Image: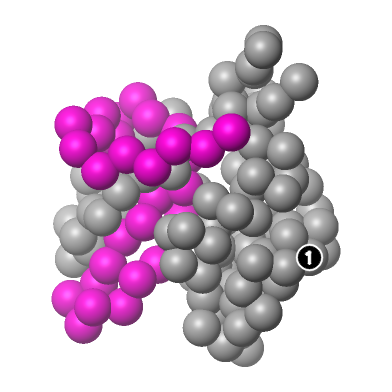
Amino acid sequence: MSTKQLPPHYVHWTPRSSHHADCAVVAISLATGFTYEEALSACLTVGPEVLHEGLTDRQTKKALKLLGFTVRMRTKRLNLEKSTGLLRVVDPKGTAHLTYLWGGRIIEPMKSDTTALWLNVADYIKDGKWTVEGLITLEEGE
């Protein structure tokens, strides 16, 4: 089976809802090129409460598989400065968040009216006092 390694050549910005816990939906949309609505449909299939509770790593991987991707969760020996994928981080209060790591840069959909591009993943982690839990990498299937 031949696969095509991501990232895409460009990222189409996907706005985030200011009233929902939809960071996984937006991160999936950014990483895959699917629209917000297409990503939301896959997410709702595996996690009906996605807009209120977000998604677990398992649900995120299932949603990506529904969209036709092969996924892998990495938790050790991460080279974040060069990696691409869905980055799972946790804030000091223990709240998990999913964002898009694109070749060492963070595309952060914090709120619907805020777009942030972090050119250095280490600065993003330090500024948010995040703890990195893992990276979901994906490859496009045939």
Residue 120, given in percent of the width and then of the height, sits at: 31, 40
Q: Which residues are magenta?
A: 70-99
Q: Residues within 10 Å of mark 1 (few under 14, many from 20)?
A: some
Q: Is residue 115 above or below residue 85?
A: below
Q: Is residue 83 magenta?
A: yes
Q: Amino acid at mark 1?
A: Ser
Viewer-closest of 92 and 121: 92
Assign a secondary structure to mark 1: helix
Viewer-closest of 132 and 120: 132
Viewer-closest of 59 and 12: 59
Q: Is residue 57 visible?
A: yes
Q: Which residue is mark 1?
A: 41
At x 57% / y 87%, what residue is drawn? 52
Residue 14, given in percent of the width and then of the height, sits at: 70, 57
Q: Is residue 113 visible?
A: no
Q: Is residue 98 above or below residue 80?
A: below
The image quadrant that residue 142 belongs to is: top right
Q: Quadrant of the N terminus?
A: top right
